[in-house]
Amino acid sequence: MLDIKVEMTKTPKELPSADNPLKFGTIFTDHMFIMNYEEGKGWINPRVVPYQPISLEPSAMVFHYGQEMFEGLKAYKTEDGRTLLFRPNKNAERTNRTNRRICIPEIPIEDFVQAVKTVVKIDEAWIPTKPGTSLYIRPFIIATDPFLGVRPSHSYMFMIILSPVGPYYPEGLNPVKIWIEDEYVRAVKGGIGEAKTGGNYVASLRSQVKAHDEGYSQVMWLDGVDRKYIEEVGAMNIFFKINGTLITPLLTGSILPGVTRDSVIQVCKEWGLAVEERRISIDEIYEAYQNGTLEEVFGTGTAAVISPVGGLRWGDQIMQVQDGGIGPVSQKLYDTLTGIQLGRIEDTHNWTVEV
Ligand SMILES: *Cc1c(COP(=O)(O)O)cnc(C)c1O
């Protein structure tokens, strides 16, 4: 159990009005969680303080060699006023998998969850209640040693900031158009692709800009060796429904293991759908498209939950899926997962945790 000190703000901000569209990641709540790590002492001084700038040496290692990690999860307000988290232990476990890969000291699972619950409880009034809204929770760790040599830092800061967010797609589920990247790669097996760290995102920016310029909202990555097996999309894992079977790339080391991905696989298996985790090539997708068996494509991730894909562009080929609309499995998954998250559907898996 952490002994978390709390310093409440003396100047609370005005809560966003219910009509505010809440652009993703732009508004932050009144408080944040901070805990320091010092060699020989471990994680120390857990505290909740007013949301504020932090001060670091320009030589802090995070600025130079990118030793940092982050997580993302959400808190939801139920109709009867309870606050629910969705599978926070999974984010805590993944934090430690990331930390092991990039040499950041681990945080006990129960401490991570306690820290999230504590700061969310304090800023509970910030959880929006309109349909599709939630409180996005961003835990992250940075290396703070003032040192320009390359080695793991001896000191760190773990922080949690909170941001009220609107529905990812303001008009409800909205199919996205995806650019299949055949020039750059995001990650390779043995690299850091399965760690949730900023380095993977900086590697993706060039392609994202290119895709945006071409009118596509997200990039789909192919593997870095054969350049033909599907990996994932932006900040989402990807599923294809081909001839009645749901297929998602096998986690082989270069793909981020999503909590939403894991939840979708479990739910679909319970529905009796055939689910395969295996390597799937872009040629197989194109062939399915041509013979009319590519039934649905959707991304999965905390931000959008389910993101139907209406079109894919691969070189000169443009593949339209579901006539650019939303498939029935995508819709049912969205309704089911958001129903569980909001406490409207019975949570048979014990996935939700009350704050
Ligand atoms: C966070 C993330 C996902 C989705 O993970 P969830 O736990 O479902 O939110 C997928 N891909 C990448 C690269 C990510 O960073």
Image: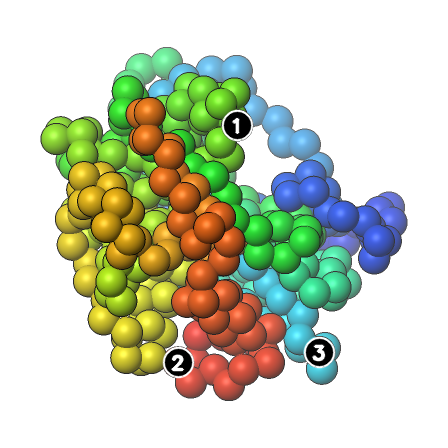
Q: Earlier in the sequence, mark 2 or mark 3?
A: 3
- Please tell me how crowded label 1 is: few (under 14), some (14-19), or many (20+) other residues with Cα within 10 Å: few
Does the rendering let one see residue 53? yes
Q: Residue at x 35, y 49 (%)?
A: 237
Q: CA distance from mark 2 to mark 3?
A: 20 Å
Q: Earlier in the sequence, mark 1 or mark 2?
A: 1
Q: Which SS class for mark 1?
A: loop
Query: Does residue 12 sit above or below 214 in this rendering?
Result: below
**Nearer to us in this view, 114 or 245:** 245
Q: Residue at x 27, y 56 (%)?
A: 293
CB within 8 Å, label 3 to label 1: no
CB within 8 Å, label 1 to label 2: no
Residue at image mark 2: 349
Q: CA distance from mark 1 to mark 2?
A: 39 Å
- Please tell me how crowded label 3 is: few (under 14), some (14-19), or many (20+) other residues with Cα within 10 Å: few
Q: CA distance from mark 3 to mark 1?
A: 38 Å
Q: Horizontal and vertical percent for residue 218?
A: 45, 36
